Image (spheres, rainbow, N blue to C red):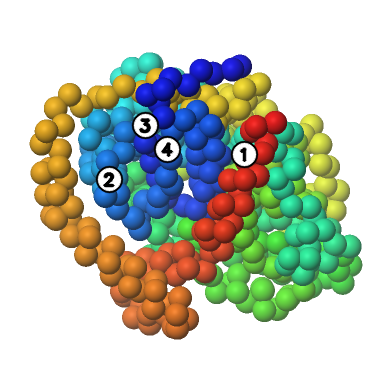
Amino acid sequence: MMRVIPENKKKKIVTIVIEVANRELDNAILLKTELEKRGYAVRIMSKTEELRKTPTDILVTPNCYIKPDYDFYRYRFNCPSGMLVNLQYEQVLSPIEEDNELYSLDDTSKGITHICWGRHTVDRLTGKGVAKENLPVTGAIQLDTTRPMFDSRWKTRSEISDEFNLDQNKKWILYISSFATTSGGLINEVQKLTHTEDNVDRFSKITDESQAETLLWFDRFLSDSDNSGYLVIYRPHPVELSSPIVNSLREKYPDSFRVIQDYEVKQWIRVSDIPCTWLSTAISESYFSGKNCLVFRPYEIPWDIDCVIFNDVRSAKTYEEFLNEIKFYNPSLDAFPIDRKLIEYYYNFSLEPAFRKIADVIDSQRPRISDTETFEGERKAYLRSGHIPLKLSVKRLYRTWYRATGKKLKNERLRSKFFVEEWEKTVDNRINSAALISEKEKIFRDIIDR
């Protein structure tokens, strides 16, 4: 459908904030490309590493559930109008999380626009008192690139093989890890806000036990000479910290157990022979890519802390079942381990891509804050009270030093408290390079303009 761009639209500035690059950067670039086509000026900024000096008209956030979130984004990224569009990347939760205040929205956040992937999120949030007009259903932008129109932007199996020195003649088992709830790990800080201490401890225990047992299965599998024709690609969760168990397998099987975090999980699903996981919502990306995904669960996850789309999932619970699932893998969606109707209830997938629907939502935004005269003073007070400029300066200095020397801070207490490993990842992770971002923008532009 042809859209007419009003002349005054060209002056509007949109800032897209990303939190986890591996999860969100390609989505942000795709949305940026569409918005620029419509006449907006768009900038992508990191949630934890940047501060916007000049005002933005519309702010697109990865999450915004409570007033502290709203204040953080509005003041840090300089949005006097209060026009926030929340992509809310956390839409497939556990029953406990769904009932938690954080994901139920408070009075402040109920007034902004929340992008919904499917009917379930609308049903859940209208039940919490959010106005339906603030809950547009667009589908999930992360699934857009599974559409045939984007086939040309993916690397081929041969290209991936050459880049990472992977044996093409082997069957590639892609293990999509979601073992991010480690002791002292970043994800636990979020879970403390959404769970009781007992539930955090329960889930952490199940996570640690499941990771250890699943990796024992892979160890046993790879030690068998009959399985020499397989290669395991272990893809860590975007915020997963280094694991001694994973590292030991990588050292024990350097040619058949590889740990690779580069690229989106969709890239790996496309080129792998057998996708599998424990709990990851990336199973939906396998589904919409048209490929069956195996589920390995050596320990049962109680329903109240399990992800809702894994309700009644069919999974391998023993090594023998694990082995059988791999040896007799059926790639067809007819063998998919989750009820297809359940997935489609959570993820609306229509003919029009989500990135265009989200851009339509941004087109419809109107200022929410009538009095912006006091904004600048309030913003300065907010930044000063949180010592935000100072914290950002320290982080930038460390990243510059780490990039130049390769040396890491050794104090484990400080590393854990300030998530220093995450700072280092922003240096190590090639996905953040300006050249790659520019290259992706060109690819998306060529596809959208066809």
Q: Which residue is denoted by mark 3 in the rendering?
A: 11
- 294 vs 305, nearest the viewer: 294
Give the CA distance from mark 2 to mark 3: 14 Å
Res 99 seen here: no
Estimate how packed mark 3 is, as few (under 14), some (14 to 19) or many (20 or more) residues with alpha carbons within 10 Å. few
Res 48 quadrant in image: bottom left
- 192 vs 317, nearest the viewer: 192
What numbered label is drawn on residue 54? 2
Estimate how packed mark 1 is, as few (under 14), some (14 to 19) or many (20 or more) residues with alpha carbons within 10 Å. some
Instruction: State the quadrant of the N terminus.
Output: top right
Give the CA distance from mark 4 to mark 2: 13 Å
Q: Which residue is denoted by mark 1 in the rendering?
A: 445
Instruction: State the quadrant of the C terminus.
Output: top right
Asked if the residue under mark 3 is in contact with the one under mark 2, i.e. CB atoms within 8 Å, the reply is: no
Q: Position of residue 282 (x, y in %)?
A: 60, 44
Question: Hey, what amino acid is under mark 2?
Answer: Thr
Give the CA distance from mark 4 to mark 3: 7 Å
Q: Position of residue 263 (x, y in %)?
A: 62, 55
Q: Which residue is denoted by mark 4 in the rendering?
A: 41
Q: Earlier in the sequence, mark 3 or mark 1?
A: 3
Q: Residue at coordinates 36% horizontally, 77% vertically from top-left?
A: 412
Q: Nearer the viewer, mark 3 or mark 1?
A: 3
